[in-house]
Amino acid sequence: MPSITIEQLDTLITLQGIETGANTLKSKLQLKLDKGKGLEDELRELKENLSLGETELEEFRKQYRTLESDIADNQTIISKSQEKLRSVKTNKEYQSMLKEIDEMKDKGSKIEDEMLKLLDSIDEKEKAIAEIKAEYSQSKDDISNERAEIEKEAQVFRDELAEMTAEHKIIEGKIDPSIFRTFNLVKDKVHGAAAVPVVSGICKGCHMNIPTQLFNELMRRETIQMCPHCQRIIYCEPQKKSVEAD
Ligand SMILES: [Zn+2]
């Protein structure tokens, strides 16, 4: 394993700290952006419902206009038949024409029933549309405010990230290129941190026990080592100086 100075080791730990911090920030930023997108989806769904409702309403009105014209036609036929009724010669013809008129009247009252039902549907649809419209307009304001708030928060994360990137660049310049290369190689292979501490003989990357001999070597902080289980770079935190008891 390559030897490392304590200074380089601390630089490596700082670099990892920046990367971990940056990753946490990126996740937080993504959460904010997802939340913003969720709100947009909500608004779009309302708009789609509104447009669907308006299409259905227009369809009902069209049907109603058709029925209006049907009933007018029917009325014309009835009037004409009643006119003819006066000039029929035979009783048989008279009866047959009466029957025909009754049937037309029957048809007319069925159309009227349908028209009443349609009027109810139109009424209901208009109410539903008014509700959606009110909800849409309220949501639009709420969402627009919330989006502005989210964007403000996201910008704070972006600014912090930019600061971290700048700091990362400075630290990168201080680290030994071969150690930086190893760090990046490990980073590509593992999930999460590439360099992790070993605490009480346990690797903080994979939570497995490190062999005693390896652990003793780490305690000297003179080399960088790989965890035999997860292949992360492992190190020991500097020992905290304990106050001597009397
Ligand atoms: Zn490990």
Image (cartoon, grey):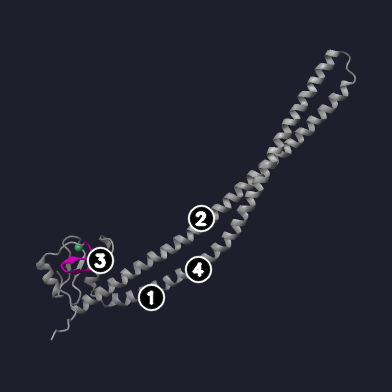
CA–CA distance in space, label 2 to label 1: 32 Å
Q: Secondary structure at mark 2?
A: helix
In x, y percent, where is residue 14? 27, 75
From mark 4 to mark 3, how far is it between C-alphas? Answer: 35 Å
Label 3 sits on what residue type?
Answer: Ala
* Residue 195 image-quadrant placement: bottom left
For residue 41, which numbered disc appears in the image? Answer: 2
Q: Which type of secondary structure does the marked residue at label 1 adopt?
A: helix
Q: Which residue is mark 4?
A: 149
> Residue 231 appears at what percent x and percent y?
19, 62
Q: Amino acid at mark 1?
A: Glu
Q: Position of residue 156 (x, y in %)?
A: 44, 72
- Return the disc, 1 or 3, that comes first in the chain's sequence: 1
- In magenta, the rendered stretch is 196-206
Tell me which label, 3 or 2, sits earlier in the chain. Answer: 2
Element at label 3: loop
Residue beneath disc 3: 194
Which residue occupies 73% across, 39% down?
Answer: 65
**Residue type for callout 4:** Glu
State the quadrant of the C terminus: bottom left
- Residue 197 in the magenta stretch? The answer is yes
Q: Do callouts 4 and 3 mark residues in contact (Cβ within 8 Å)?
A: no
Q: Nearer the viewer, residue 242 or 64?
A: 242
Q: Of discs 4 and 3, which sits in the foreground?
A: 4
Image check: 43 left or right of 32?
right
Residue 163, numbered label: 1
Task: Give ligand 1's quarter of the image.
Answer: bottom left
Mark pair 4, 1: CA separation: 22 Å
How far across and down, in percent of the image, does residue 85 sit? 87, 21
